[in-house]
Image (cartoon, rainbow, N blue to C red):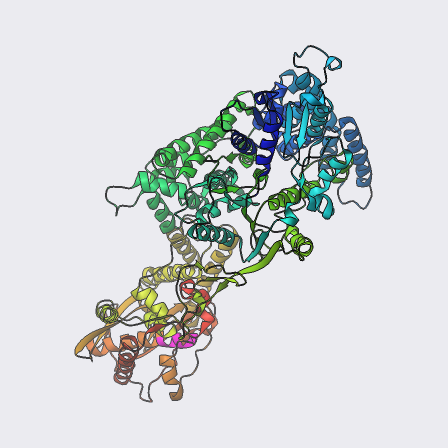
């Protein structure tokens, strides 16, 4: 087992200080607090007897402590920076400031960390912007240089110098700092703050130590130093009060000088200001290593691969231990939750060192939905053309809030009635919205449905433009949710609530300090979101757990023999080139500020430093460029392939291989796909890792007709009857018939913001029914204005939540109005003798015939839109809002196909009219006639026919059904032939146990089917 860097450092310091000096007087500075913990642990193992430990600090903590000033929080810093800006530029608004305030604060922080000459920087920016403004005056520029936007842009940069100087003076007067200012303060006052212990003498009176006295400060495991860090260390080294211990490797320090990770370190070594270089080892090229690279198809699969690898190691007895932990390094922090969920349930001993950003939490999505809800303003156009805005909520945002996991959890634990069948107020609200098809909802209506419950008051009470109103509403919501989550075992959700509560408290305190007037609702949202972006949920755990889950920066100075590094994709690790700064890239480079290439070098060093003492390394990247953070493998993997591996080919110290993780469809001999859950096969050297999953699209969907199914069908045929739509549905796709009529599968109800085709047809049918019943059958005159009034009344009844004055609904309404008016006008002019006998008439008939050893009484039923009389012809009419041309002529050779084929839309229409005409004939034969409107109609005096009215093709008039069974075509023959076909359909198709329900071979209509996602179409 190789000695860790911290172990080697601890032993070196411990042995070098014995027995002359007392080790407790030392100060050890390391990169992170985590490294400080492990250094203390390594130091404790250097002795078999107790001793007083030295002060071990992370560099940030060391600087803050020695400066003797208060570290200000970001909330107050952003407001104070705005106050300074307002003093310099009276025209600045908080809205505009929020767009770049955090960015500017970061720039000031970096300027101080890197000890940038502010005068030189701002002079450079001023001159560069002067040239840019000169170019803005060119005639070809589309934006006028005198525009307010251009003026504001250049004023921002011209004011930076004054703002920076005032801001620093303001903070110094209050003895408060931001991180960079703390570093600058210590770097510029190192003698007074670190070397002059009595704090009174000048730096000229400092007594330098000799080499024999030994250093008081040790800087351990640092890499790329900021200018302030370098100045602090160099000053202490020059005074012989400090020593710096590096963790570097021969590979990137000498053998491969093109590795960017060693660039800064090579510069420090060559400058020789650190004294004797300690240490450079030769671990990468000389120690055996197994490096395996996995290519996975999507980001979530990385978590499964990592979890499966660690599960197998634990099963083989090779999992992590306290002294030899395994590290899962997440270069993308968004993978934390998937990785935790991907671990085996038996793995509980782990430590998470990286924070979970509040921005990625479920709680944030709820807060975001509430702001979206509050910003909803329903806009309508009045008849006189005015635009009217109403403070109503959109149904989408309301349902989004009510269906949020936090709210659903609250419903489950706090809103359930003793009677579990009774709907909760949340279920009631969602059902009412869907049932009434409310597109826009008044807050009072929601509170009524919610029975004025505190939850509904917190969710749907209208916020004003005062941030304190928002904070109070969010406090109420947190209190309600906290009562639910405090008794559950879900610690992360509870931590979300607590962290957000503290953030609100911090906001409230800051706003009470005369800052509230700066914020309206939108600026408050933007400001709070910026704070949420910066806020992380810290995880606490046992630091010496066998499994360590961490980000790349948390690995500084730590060593692991076995590593899993995820998201090894270019653009993720290293990150894509983004200059999140107001300072242009070329100016930043000129004045010595870090640019993206410096950040790449930092990540390169951390990566290769992890490889130094590792023995078993597993690197995972995503191959699919269309998925989240997927695409090209990281340049670091390519460097391993083409540089590191080639250097070790002779001695074979590095064994390198690449594996592909891929989906595989396992099929049995009968080609039916297994419905196994997702599994990851055993990882074998040289073999591809394979995933099995169900491939629904190729599944041969069939559902057998069991005795129970057949019994259900027979009972349904006797009780409810067979309708033409049911017959057509079975012939079109028997699997669709099964889902709809037997399994009872239906789509979730949803609110439609535009009138759908089915709703449009229902609306037109209802209007025509009322006109037939209230006017034509009563022999009352009908005018265009009456038709329009009925259209509006039925629209309001059926679509109370729709807006018919704008968008596509306005167009559809106008189409409906014109269609109905033209249809009725055409009917009045085309045939004065037309008499409406019935509307929406329900008819049924019974047929008795044997099925096996039983006799079934089959009920045939239908609802006819209109029965009308023209001269001596009774016409069974059906309205179609779509366009229909003349139906195809039926010949004897086509008859069998028409009665049994489900692939032709015209055949469906013919069958519908056939059933309607059959029902009329059956009743007239059974009752000796047909009684309508107090009149008797007999077959000896009247003919019967059936047909369509196409409301989009009104000039065609009545489109008659061409179906004839024989030349006679009399009622008795028509009924006999019809019942023959009906019996054949029932016995040979619907109730045939040997014919299972199966999906259709005609896929043209599948795109509109409600069940396409189930059957894989």
Whether 131 is drawn above or below 964: the answer is above
Q: How many numbered marks does the figure carry?
A: 0
Taking the magenta stretch, the answer to whether it contains residue 40 is no
Of residue 853 and residue 647, the one placed in the foreground of this image is 647
For residue 148, what is the image quadrant? top right
Left or right of 782 on screen, residue 70: right
| Quadrant of image for the C terminus | bottom left
Left or right of 401 on screen, residue 227: right
Q: Is residue 185 visible?
A: no
Q: Which residues are magenta?
A: 904-911
| Quadrant of image for the N terminus | top right
Name the spot of residue 198 as percent of width and height, x first.
65, 11
Of residue 701 and residue 515, the one placed in the foreground of this image is 701
Left or right of 764 on screen, residue 244: right
For residue 854, what is the image quadrant? bottom left
Q: Residue at x 72, y 38 (%)?
A: 264
Name the spot of residue 378 as percent of width and height, x first.
49, 43
Q: Residue at x 48, y 37 (%)?
A: 544
């Amino acid at each position: 087992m190789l000695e860790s860097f911290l172990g080697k450092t601890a032993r070196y310091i411990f042995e070098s200080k014995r027995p002359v000096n007392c080790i407790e007087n030392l100060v050890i500075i390391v990169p992170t607090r985590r490294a400080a913990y492990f250094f203390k642990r390594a130091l404790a193992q250097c002795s078999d007897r107790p001793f007083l430990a030295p002060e071990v600090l992370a560099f940030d903590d060391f600087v803050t402590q020695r400066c003797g000033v208060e570290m200000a929080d970001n909330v107050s810093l952003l407001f104070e920076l705005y106050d300074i800006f307002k003093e310099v530029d009276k025209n600045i608004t908080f809205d505009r400031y929020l767009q770049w305030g955090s960015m500017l604060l970061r720039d000031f922080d970096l300027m101080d960390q890197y000890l940038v000459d502010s005068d030189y920087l701002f002079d450079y920016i001023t001159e560069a912007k002067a040239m840019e403004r000169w170019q803005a005056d060119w005639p070809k520029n589309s934006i006028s240089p005198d525009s307010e936007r251009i003026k504001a842009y250049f004023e921002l940069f011209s004011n930076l110098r004054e703002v920076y100087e005032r801001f620093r003076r303001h903070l110094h007067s209050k003895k408060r700092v931001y991180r960079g200012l703390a570093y600058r303060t210590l770097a510029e006052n190192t003698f007074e703050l670190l070397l002059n212990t009595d704090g009174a003498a000048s730096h000229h009176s400092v007594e330098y130590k000799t080499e024999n006295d030994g250093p008081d400060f040790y800087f351990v495991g640092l890499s790329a130093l900021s200018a302030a860090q370098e100045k602090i260390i160099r000053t202490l080294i020059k005074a012989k009060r400090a020593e710096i211990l590096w963790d570097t490797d021969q590979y990137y320090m000498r053998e491969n000088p093109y590795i960017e990770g060693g660039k800064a370190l090579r510069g420090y070594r060559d400058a020789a200001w650190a004294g004797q270089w300690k240490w450079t080892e030769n671990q990468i090229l000389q120690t055996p290593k197994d490096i395996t690279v996995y290519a996975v198809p999507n980001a979530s699969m990385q978590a499964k691969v990592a979890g499966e690898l660690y599960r197998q190691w634990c099963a083989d007895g090779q999992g992590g231990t306290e002294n030899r932990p395994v590290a899962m390094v997440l270069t993308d922090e968004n993978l934390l939750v998937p990785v935790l969920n991907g671990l085996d349930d038996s793995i509980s001993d782990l430590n998470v060192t990286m924070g979970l950003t509040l921005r990625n939490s479920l709680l944030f999505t709820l807060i975001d939905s509430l702001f979206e809800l509050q910003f909803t303003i329903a806009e309508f156009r009045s008849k006189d053309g005015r635009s009217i805005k109403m403070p109503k909520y959109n149904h989408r945002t309301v349902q989004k809030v009510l269906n949020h996991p936090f709210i659903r959890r609250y419903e489950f634990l706090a809103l359930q009635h003793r009677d579990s069948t009774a709907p909760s107020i949340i279920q009631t609200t969602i059902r009412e919205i869907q049932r009434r098809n409310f597109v826009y909802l008044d807050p009072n209506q929601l509170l009524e449905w919610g029975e004025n419950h505190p939850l509904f008051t917190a969710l749907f009470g209208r916020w004003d433009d005062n941030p304190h109103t928002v904070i109070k509403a969010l406090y109420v919501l947190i209190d309600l949710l906290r009562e639910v989550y405090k008794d559950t075992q879900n610690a992360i959700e509870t931590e979300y609530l607590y962290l957000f509560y503290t953030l609100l408290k911090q906001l409230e305190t800051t706003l009470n300090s005369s800052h509230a007037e700066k914020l309206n609702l939108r600026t408050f949202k933007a400001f709070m979101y910026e704070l949420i972006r910066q806020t992380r949920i810290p995880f606490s755990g046992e630091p010496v757990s066998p499994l360590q889950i961490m980000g790349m920066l948390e690995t500084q100075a730590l060593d692991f023999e076995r590593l899993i590094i995820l998201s090894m994709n270019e653009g993720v690790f290293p990150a894509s080139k983004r200059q999140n700064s107001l300072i242009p890239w070329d100016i930043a480079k000129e004045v010595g500020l870090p640019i993206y290439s410096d950040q790449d070098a930092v990540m390169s060093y951390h990566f290769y430093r992890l490889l130094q003492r590792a023995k078993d390394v597993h690197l995972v990247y995503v191959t699919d460029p269309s998925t989240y953070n997927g695409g090209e493998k990281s340049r670091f993997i390519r460097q391993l392939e083409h540089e590191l591996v080639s250097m070790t080919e002779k001695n074979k110290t590095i064994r390198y291989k690449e594996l592909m993780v891929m989906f595989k469809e396992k099929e049995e001999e009968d080609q039916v796909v297994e419905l196994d859950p997702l599994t990851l096969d055993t990882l074998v050297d040289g073999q591809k890792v394979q995933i099995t999953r169900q491939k629904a699209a190729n599944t041969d969907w069939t559902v057998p007709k069991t005795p129970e199914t057949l019994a259900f069908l027979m009972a349904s045929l006797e009780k409810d009857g067979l309708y033409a739509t049911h017959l057509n549905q079975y012939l079109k796709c028997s699997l669709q018939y099964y889902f709809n009529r037997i399994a009872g599968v239906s789509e979730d109800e949803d609110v439609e913001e535009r009138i759908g085709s089915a709703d449009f047809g229902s609306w037109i049918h209802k209007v025509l029914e009322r006109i037939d019943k209230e006017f034509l059958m009563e022999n009352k005159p009908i005018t265009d204005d009456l038709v329009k009034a009925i259209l509006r009344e039925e629209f309001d009844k059926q679509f109370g939540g729709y807006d018919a004055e704008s968008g596509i609904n306005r167009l559809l309404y106008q189409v409906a109005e014109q269609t109905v008016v033209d249809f009725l006008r055409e009917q009045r002019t085309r045939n004065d003798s037309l008499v409406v006998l019935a509307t929406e008439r329900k008819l049924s008939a019974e047929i008795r015939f044997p099925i096996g050893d039983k006799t079934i009484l089959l009920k045939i039923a239908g609802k006819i839109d209109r029965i009308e009389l023209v001269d001596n012809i009774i016409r069974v009419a059906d309205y179609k809002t779509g366009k229909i041309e003349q139906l195809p002529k039926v010949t004897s050779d086509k008859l069998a196909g028409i009665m049994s084929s489900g692939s032709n839309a015209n055949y469906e229409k013919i069958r519908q009219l056939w059933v309607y005409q059959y029902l009329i004939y059956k009743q007239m034969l059974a009752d000796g006639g047909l009684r309508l409107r107090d009149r008797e109609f007999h077959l000896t005096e009247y003919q019967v026919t059936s047909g369509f009215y196409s409301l989009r093709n009104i000039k065609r008039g009545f489109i008659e059904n061409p179906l004839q069974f024989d030349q006679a075509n009399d009622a008795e023959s028509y009924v006999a032939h019809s019942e023959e076909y009906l019996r054949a359909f029932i016995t040979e198709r619907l109730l045939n146990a040997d014919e299972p329900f199966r999906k259709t071979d005609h896929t043209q209509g599948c795109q509109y089917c409600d069940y396409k996602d189930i059957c894989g179409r």
